Image (cartoon, helix red, strand yellow):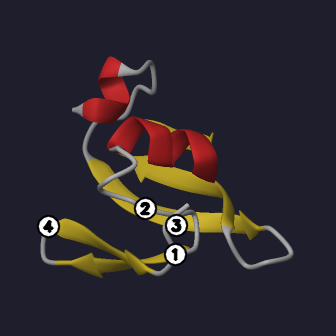
Amino acid sequence: MLLSRNGIKVDGILSIEPVSFTSSRRVSELQIRHKNGIEKISGVNFRKIIGYETIRSTLFRIKEGEGSFIFYGKGSG
């Protein structure tokens, strides 16, 4: 998994949710709840790890699907 390869130890992700936003409503910090606890990561670092082409801006929201998480938003950086 991309997060684990980048030093963020998560096992069995249960939820991913924004916990803080900038004044322009961009994700400032995310909380990743997993089987062994909770990890927090900045929105900028999360985007860097996942990939700038995959998450094109920190102006996004997250929707939980069946066994997956859907990121949607707008902007290009």
Q: Amino acid at mark 4?
A: Gly
- State the residue position of label 3: 17
Closer to viewer: mark 1 or mark 3: 1
Among numbered discs 4 and 2, the one appearing first in the sequence: 2
How far apart marks 2 and 3 lie (CA) works out to 17 Å
Within 10 Å of disc 1 (Cα), the crowding (few <14, some 14-19, many 20+) is few
Q: Is residue 42 visible?
A: no
Circle 3 residues within 10 Å: few <14, some 14–19, many ≥20 = some
SS class, disc 1: loop
Return the x and y of residue 13 as percentages of the image width and height: 31, 50
* Residue type for callout 2: Arg
What distance separates the C-alpha of mark 4 from that of mark 1?
Answer: 26 Å
Residue 67 — which label?
4
Q: Are marks 1 and 3 in contact (CB under 8 Å)?
A: no
Q: Which residue is mark 2?
A: 56
Real-space Cα distance between discs 1 and 2?
7 Å
Q: Residues within 10 Å of mark 4 (few under 14, many from 20)?
A: few
The front one of 24 and 34 is: 24
Evaluate if marks 1 and 2 touch, with contact meaning CB atoms under 8 Å apart: yes
Mark number displayed over residue 75: 1
Left or right: 6, with 75 as reference point: left
SS category of the residue bearing label 2: loop
Helix, strand, or loop for circle 4?
loop
Callout 3 touching callout 4 (CB < 8 Å): no
**Residue 68 shown left or right of residue 62 in the figure:** left
Mark 1 residue type: Gly
